[in-house]
Structure formats: C-alpha cells, structure tokens
Image (cartoon, coloured by chain):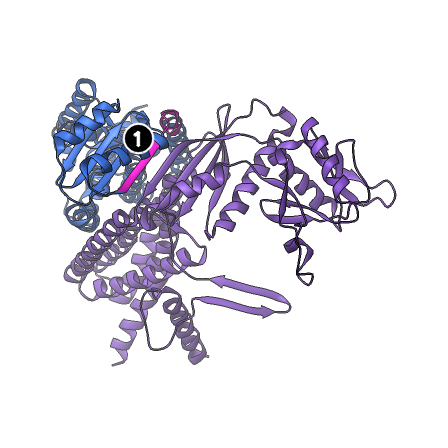
C-alpha cells in the first residue's frame, strides 16, 4: 500500500515538473507541452504554455468606444455582441492566439476592450479592428478557367455591392419548408446594384462573403428588383440568428472609435522581465537562506515546502491558463511572503510548545493545531480582498481592468496553494524527515 | 509557570506619536503638493522614441514646437526621447515621427506610443474605492464572526486605515521628490497593503483571542502584552522575509515597477508596525471600555 502511495506522489511530482519546465529550455528529448488524446470520444486537449500578458510579452491593448446614437435600445446588446464577435473573428484571422475581447459598459458609455498580446504592429491591428464589418457580394470572373475548385474560390470578382448597401438583416423562415433563413433588405442604391447583378448572372452563382469568409452562394433564378434577398442553407435557427446579427453589425455598423491605446515594444518588456526575474530569484534565495539559518532543519523543510509551492502555483498558472502580468508577478511574490509566514507561524508555535517542555513529536502536533487558526483567519481575509478585487461576476461598479484582476488572481491562487503546502505538505515533510531520523 | 513579558503597551504614546509624525508629513505633502498623476488619470499620450543616433536636441524641440504639440514632460537621454503630451492622435504621431526622421536624419523606433482618455482614471478610482469599501465591510464581517466580537474587527480596520494613510501620504512625498506617479500599479500596491495589514494583525489577535478563551480572568492589557511578546519574533521574521524579497526587487528590478515595489515595501513595514503598536493598543482600549460597562 505504501509503495503505491510513494509511486503516486512521485508521478504527480514528475507531472508537475513536466508541465513547469520552461518551453525555452532545449533538451535532447523534445518535451511536449500539450496533451491531446481521446477518452470515450471526448477530446482532451490542453496546452501547457506560459501565457505572458501585454506587459511581459509586449503587445497592444486597445479600447474602442461604440457610438450607440444610431442603434435602437432593444438592438444594443445584439449589436455590441456582434461587434465583439466580428472583432474576434478578425483577430483570429490576423493570427493572434489569445485575444481577450470584452464589451465594457461604463456609465452610459459602451466600450470594447481588445487585448492583443504579442502584436507589435498595432497600426495594422487597429486598422483591421476599426474597419466596418465587410459584407461583400461576389460573382464569377469573366475569364473563368478552373472548374474543379470549390465554388467559393471561383467567386473572385467583386460586384461593388457590400454591407453598406444593406439597411437591415432579419431572421426569417421559409414559407414553404419552414427552414430558417437570413433576410436582407437593401437600401436604394443597393436595390439598383442588386437588380443589375442578378440580371447579368441568371443561372450563375453569386457569393455572399462576410469578412472574406464565404456564407452562401445561391444560383440566381431571375432578376430581383425589389431590393430584398435571402441567405439560405442548412442553417439552424441559432446560426441564422448569429449570422443576421453579424450582418447587421456590418450593415448597420456600430461605429467604434479608438479611445485608448497602449503598446509596449518587446525590448522594453523583456529587459524589465529579466531584471525582475533575476531580482526575484535573489530575493527568494535570501528568504530561503534566512529560513535555514534561523530555523535550521525546520527551515530546510520549509524551503522544500516552498519549492513544492512554487511548482504547484506555476502548474496552476499554466493550466488555467493565466495570462501573467507584472502586477500578477507581484501578487505571486506577496503570496510567497504569506506562504513563508504560514511556516514561520507554525515553527514559532512548535518552539513555544517545546519551551513548555513538550517532546518534539507532541510539539509538532500541537504547534500545527494552534497555528492553524491564525493561518486560516489571515488567509481567508486575504482571499476576501482578492475575491472582491478580481470581481468574478464582472460587476460594473467594481474594477474591470486587467492589472488589478491579474494581481488578485495570482494572489488568490498563491494564498490558496500556500494554505495547502504550508499546512499539509510541510507537515508531511516534517513527519518523513524526523521519522527517518528516529529510525536511523 | 513563569513567562517573560515585555510591557509593550507602556510606550503606546510613543507609537502613536511616531504614527502621527509619519502620517502628518504625508498629509502635509498631500495638501501642499498633491500627487503627480500618470497618464492613466490625466489622459494624454506617452511617447518613447529610440533614435538610431544622437540627435540635435534644439532642432528636435523646434520641430515639436512647430507642430504645436503640447508637451507636458520631456526627457532626452542620449538617443532616446521620452515625452508626455496632451492627447496626440495616431496620424499626428506618425506625422511627428516622419518629420523628426526627415529633419534629424535618423531612424526612429517607437518604443512606446500610448493614448489614454481621461475618463478612465475617474472610473477606475471610483470602482476601486467601492471595491475597497466592500473589502473593508467583508473584513469586518468575517473578523467579527471569527473573533466573536466587533472590537477585534474594528481595531484591525483602524490599523489598516492607519497603514493606508501612511502609504498614500508617503507616496505623495515620493511623488513630489522623486517623480513617482499615481497609476494603476499604485492602486494595486495600496490594495496589497490593505490585505497585508489585516493579515498581519490577525496573527497577533489570534494569540490574544487564545488568552481570552483560556484565561478569562486575565486583564486585556496583560493578555495583549503577553501576546505581543510571544508574536514579536514571528512578526519580525515574517516581515524580514517579505522585505528581503521586495528590497531585492526595488534595488535590482525593472524601473517601471520600482515605485510599485517601493510602495509595497512601505506597506509591509507599516503593516507590520501597526499590528502590535496601533491595532493592539486600540483593541486593549476598546476592551477596557467594554469591561467597565
């Protein structure tokens, strides 16, 4: 039984190290930083890489303010969410892996905050995001050659009809088969253009593209002069609703204006980071030396406990994944301090019990028991503060900006982990070390 | 059983005096000089240009002036220009960059270009204040519950407010003499101090609570003195470890977080100081009043 336990602990330990090893370290054997397997048809995919925030990796943080003056109140949320989705699609198209886009309502202002870690060419990003959702209609080019390529790829010629010519898009249902479809209503100029396009393309397909993604390519049956069109296909009602919202944001663009822009070049970020990491390492070594110097064997055990604490915290950071920022690192450092505090509290209590003449074994047991109240109360208050700062329900009247939240999250994870390592792990370590001493 | 007991509370007026002096200096600075607010609060544009070679500063300033850019602060270090201006839109920024590049015959790498609207600051402060008040209420409720009495909670919060005043006041001094700016990092540091302060106080209060439960006959003052004597080593050791950490970061860490870490350092020191020397005397005072009733 005992051997299984040891093996299990060893396996967990190895797993922690496997995840925690920095990606930058090159080893002879490539360490995969990703889990990807199937369990009962369920695909488990987990990427364990360090996500660095804008301040550490460099990048752009953009806040757009939405002009809601032209949007009806009941359509407002749809429009904002659609704008968010459009921006996300664009950023994904742009090749950024971890964008964070949120709609932010502050007072009577509606904003969209866009965080792009790792983008240095922010002008390009702003242009991409800031432009209106582009709905385009395309037809077959005059000199079409290849016929084996998919129909969407053949539709390359712009007709000049775009989202700006659409006055409204609605969710409709086919009167014959009840299939959901997207109804488009063109404005005056759009109606004329559409009539001309349908007239010259009878029997041929016309493609509708949203942000260069093909939506549908129906074959034109006849000229449509009344300025309305439908997008059909095997859509669910949900799809149609989304599509309609997306087109609406293009057709009725909610104009967004850049109100805040931040960018840090990676040169600035990386020196800051490496300096601070270096300084943090020295600080940590000083703490460990101090503990060993002052508390001797117990201090050594606490140092081991701290190392395990570091491994577990880092594991959690990578597993969430948490986007690490400088205030986040500060929160982590503070939590290290609090983890050390838990140990000091316990050791002082043990010493106290020993002074009362208790044997070491009993002193350890009593010391832990007595220290636990203080540790519990102190950490719960810290967690309370972290919880309010993190604002998990995204309440409008509490901080919604990333820095404070990043700080609160690492602090909370750190304090939570330190409760575990400081109490459970340290206790186990003391038992193991002192038992082996007794046996020897 | 004999126990060593140092009469810490005998000198309570000295502790109060020290606090009054420190907080007084801070408050004086706040009312006299106020704070330097970072762009987070004032709104404006931060620009950091790296020139490919050393350039003529006079010529450069002439160009900036000619473009009617309102410069708030400006610093030129060899080939690197850092300046803060009134809100500068993107096109003006690229215009400025091009104009400087052409006239000074040097290439510019934009290390920083950020524009912030002034409204964000007010909201952030307001929201953070609300969060702080909520946090204080949370602490009051939890501590009243955990320590079975309002006096503990109240004293801890008094000490916390003391620490906040110390931190905010000394930041005003840092702001005036060393150019520290109030930014979101500062807000974070203040919030850290808030949680650390209570964290530290609770450890001492836990000890006092124990004496409360074990020896109900012990008068509040002796109980407090005994608790202080027994927790002093842990208080010092604990603060020492955090101070090691922060000192290393202050001295060697990156420059953008220096004032942040320094503020955390001040917060740690005052947080440690206030637990035995402010929170505990206040608690003893409150408990005495309660017993007299």
Nearest to the observer: residue B251 or residue A258? A258
Of the chain colours in the picture, the one used for chain A is: purple
What is the number of callouts on the image? 1
Disc 1: which residue: B45
Observer-nearest of B199 and B38: B38
- Taking B11 as reference, is A115 above or below it? below
Q: Horizontal and vertical percent for residue A60?
A: 38, 43
Q: Quadrant of residue A407?
A: top left
The residue furthest top is B32
* Membership of B113 in magenta stretch: yes
In the figure, what tint was chain B given?
blue
Please name the residue shown 59% across and 65% down the image: A43
Residue B52 location in percent, x, y? 19, 45
Q: Can residue B264 be seen at all in this image of the molecule?
A: no
Question: Quadrant location of residue B282?
Answer: top left
For the magenta stretch, what is the residue range? B110-124
Residue A284 x %, y %: 22, 56
Quadrant (top left/top right/bottom left/bottom right) for the C terminus of chain A:
bottom left
Q: Residue at x 23, y 37 (%)?
A: B102
Pinpoint the chain carrying mark 1.
B
């Amino acid at each position: 039984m005992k051997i299984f336990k040891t093996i299990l602990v060893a396996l967990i330990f190895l797993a922690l190290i496997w995840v925690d090893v920095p990606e930058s370290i090159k080893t002879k054997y490539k360490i995969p930083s990703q889990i990807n397997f199937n369990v009962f048809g369920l695909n488990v995919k987990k990427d364990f890489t360090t996500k660095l925030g804008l301040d550490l990796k460099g990048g752009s943080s953009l806040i757009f303010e939405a002009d809601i003056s032209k949007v009806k109140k009941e359509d407002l949320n749809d429009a904002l969410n659609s704008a968010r989705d459009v921006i996300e699609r664009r950023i994904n198209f742009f090749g950024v892996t971890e964008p964070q886009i949120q709609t932010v309502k502050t007072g009577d202002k509606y904003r969209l905050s866009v965080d792009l870690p790792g983008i240095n060419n922010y002008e390009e990003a702003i242009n991409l995001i800031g432009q209106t959702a582009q709905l385009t209609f395309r037809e077959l080019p005059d000199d079409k050659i290849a016929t084996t390529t998919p129909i969407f790829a053949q539709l390359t010629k712009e007709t000049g009809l775009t989202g700006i010519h659409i006055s409204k898009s609605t969710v409709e249902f086919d009167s014959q088969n009840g299939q959901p479809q997207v109804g488009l209503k063109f404005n005056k100029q759009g109606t004329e253009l559409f009539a001309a396009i349908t007239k010259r393309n009878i029997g041929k397909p016309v493609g509708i593209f949203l942000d260069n993604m093909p939506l549908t390519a129906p074959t034109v049956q006849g000229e449509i002069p009344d300025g309305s069109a439908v997008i059909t296909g095997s859509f669910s009602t949900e799809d149609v609703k989304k599509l309609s919202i997306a087109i609406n944001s293009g057709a009725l663009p909610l104009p967004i204006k850049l109100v805040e822009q931040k960018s840090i070049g990676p040169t600035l970020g990386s020196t800051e980071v490496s300096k601070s990491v270096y300084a943090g390492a020295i600080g940590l070594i000083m703490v460990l030396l101090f503990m060993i110097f002052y508390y001797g064997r117990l201090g050594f055990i606490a140092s081991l406990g701290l190392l395990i604490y570091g491994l577990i915290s880092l594991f959690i950071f990578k597993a969430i994944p948490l986007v690490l920022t400088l205030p986040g690192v500060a929160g982590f450092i503070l939590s290290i301090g609090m983890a050390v505090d838990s140990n000091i509290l316990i050791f002082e209590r043990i010493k106290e019990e020993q002074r009362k003449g208790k044997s070491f074994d009993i002193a350890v047991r009593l010391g832990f028991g007595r220290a636990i109240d203080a540790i519990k109360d102190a950490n719960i208050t810290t967690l309370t503060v972290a919880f309010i700062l993190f604002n998990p329900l995204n309440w409008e009247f509490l901080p919604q900006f990333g820095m404070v939240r990043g700080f609160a999250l690492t602090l909370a994870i750190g304090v939570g982990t330190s409760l575990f390592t400081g109490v459970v792990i340290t206790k186990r370590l003391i038992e193991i070390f002192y038992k082996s001493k007794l046996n020897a | 059983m004999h126990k060593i007991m140092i009469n810490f509370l005998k000198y309570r007026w000295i502790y109060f005096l020290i606090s009054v002096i420190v907080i007084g200096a801070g408050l004086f600075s706040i009312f006299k000089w106020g704070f330097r607010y970072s762009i987070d609060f004032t709104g404006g544009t931060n620009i950091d240009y790296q020139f490919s070679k050393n350039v003529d500063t006079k010529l450069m300033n002439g160009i900036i002036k000619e473009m009617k850019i309102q410069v708030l602060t400006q610093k030129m270090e060899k080939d690197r220009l850092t300046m803060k201006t009134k809100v500068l839109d993107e096109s003006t920024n690229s215009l400025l960059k091009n104009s400087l590049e052409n006239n000074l015959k040097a290439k510019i790498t934009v290390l920083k270009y950020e524009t912030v609207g002034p409204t964000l600051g007010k909201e952030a402060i307001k929201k953070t204040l609300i969060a702080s008040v909520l946090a204080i209420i949370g602490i009051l409720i939890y501590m009243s519950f955990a320590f079975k009495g309002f006096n503990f909670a109240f004293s801890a919060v008094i000490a916390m407010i003391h620490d906040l005043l110390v931190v905010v006041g000394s930041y005003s001094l840092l702001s005036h003499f060393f150019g520290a700016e109030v930014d979101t990092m500062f807000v974070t540091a203040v919030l850290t101090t808030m949680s650390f302060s209570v964290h530290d106080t609770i450890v001492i209060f836990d000890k006092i609570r124990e004496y409360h439960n074990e020896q109900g006959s012990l008068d509040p003052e002796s109980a407090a003195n005994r608790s202080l004597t027994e927790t002093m080593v842990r208080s010092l050791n604990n603060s020492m470890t955090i101070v090691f950490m922060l000192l290393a970061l202050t001295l060697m860490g990156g420059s953008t977080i220096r004032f942040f870490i320094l503020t955390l350092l001040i917060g740690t020191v005052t947080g440690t100081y206030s637990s035995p020397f402010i929170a505990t005397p206040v608690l003893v005072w409150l408990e005495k009043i309660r017993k007299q009733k």
